[in-house]
Structure formats: C-alpha cells, structure tokens
Image: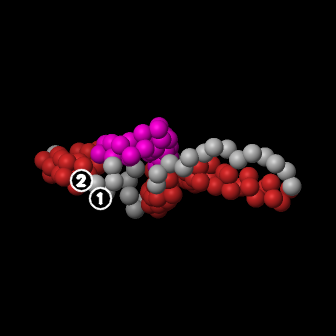
Amino acid sequence: MLFSSMTFLYMFLPIVCLIYLLAKKELHNPILLIASIIFYAWGEPRYLAIMILTILINYIGAILIEKTQKYKKTALVLTVIANLSFLVYFKYFNFIIDNMNSLLHCSVKPLNIIMPIGISFYTFQAISYIADVFRGEVKA
C-alpha cells in the first residue's frame, strides 16, 4: 500500500484517524504503533520481523538508558551499533564486498540481499529517538 493509493487514502487512513480520535490519550501511541506496523507489513511483509526486532532493540535500549545511570552511555552505544548494523548489512554489505574485491583483487560473491523498504529512514529515526532519550528530552 502506498501513501497515494486509494486503499490508503479512503480506507486505511480514515479508519486509523477515527480510532485515534475516539481512543483515550494514553492509547494514542500504541494505536499509531500498531497502524504503522500494519502499514509496513502491507507493503513489505517478509521484513516485518526485522522491523519488530529493531523496535524491540530500541525500546529496550531506551529503557536501559533511562533507568540506569551507570550503563547509560554503554546502552546508547550498543543500541546505535545495533541500528547501524541492520543498515550496513541490508544497504551497504554488497557495496563493501564489491570494493573489497576491487581493492584486494579477490572474487567474493555478493549476497542476494534485498533491502527493506525505508530502512534508512527508520534507522535514523530510531537513532534520533535513542539520542533524545539519552539527553532526557523524551521518555522511553
């Protein structure tokens, strides 16, 4: 489903907006989370597990950052590394292999990796969220 599709504009968006407006304020974020996951799964269902895994990693990282002063920086660094690891693997792994093959004159075959939709966007959004939690600007 695309943002400009009739299904999104005349079915999905109005239903989500109606549910959001009728729900209690404390349910707004869970409603938007579930709607976002449904929207993502509609367009790219095979990478839904990766999306959910990154959500869990960032949520756990944010809780650790918020609750522990002793390991706050460690939790930040590990969460950012986890986020960037997904991005490097899916977006840049074959690029790295191609460059290593050229530089080292070897012939490692690139992997057949298909990049998940929006991986750069949600990776950098997640890092921004983690940084905001670290600075105390938002709660986990």
Front position in the image: 127 or 90: 90
Residue name at image x 38 percent, y 58 percent? 138
Q: Main secondary structure of the magenta part?
A: helix
Residue 9 counted in the magenta span:
no
Left or right position of 136 against 102: left
Residue 53 counted in the magenta span:
yes
Whether pointer 1 and pointer 2 mark residues with C-beta atoms closer than 8 Å, the reply is no
Front position in the image: 69 or 88: 88
Residue name at image x 76 percent, y 58 percent? 99
Left or right position of 34 against 77: left
Front position in the image: 35 or 65: 35
Identify which amino acid the numbered label 1 is placed on.
Ser
Residue name at image x 62 percent, y 49 percent? 89
* Label 1 residue SS: loop
* Label 2 residue SS: helix
Colour logic: secondary structure
Give the percent coordinates (x, y) of residue 82. 58, 48
Marks counted in the figure total: 2
Identify which amino acid the numbered label 2 is placed on.
Met
Give the percent coordinates (x, y) of residue 44. 43, 44
Residue name at image x 33 percent, y 49 percent? 1
Find residue 4 and name its label.
1
Q: Which residue is under mark 2? A: 6
Front position in the image: 91 or 36: 91
Give the percent coordinates (x, y) of residue 51. 46, 44
Rate crowding at label 1 as few (under 14), some (14 to 19) or many (20 or more) other CA atoms within 10 Å. Answer: few
Whether residue 41 is visible here, answered yes or no, is: yes
Give the percent coordinates (x, y) of residue 85. 61, 49
Which residues lie in the magenta part? 34-62
Direction left: furthest residue: 22
Direction right: furthest residue: 105
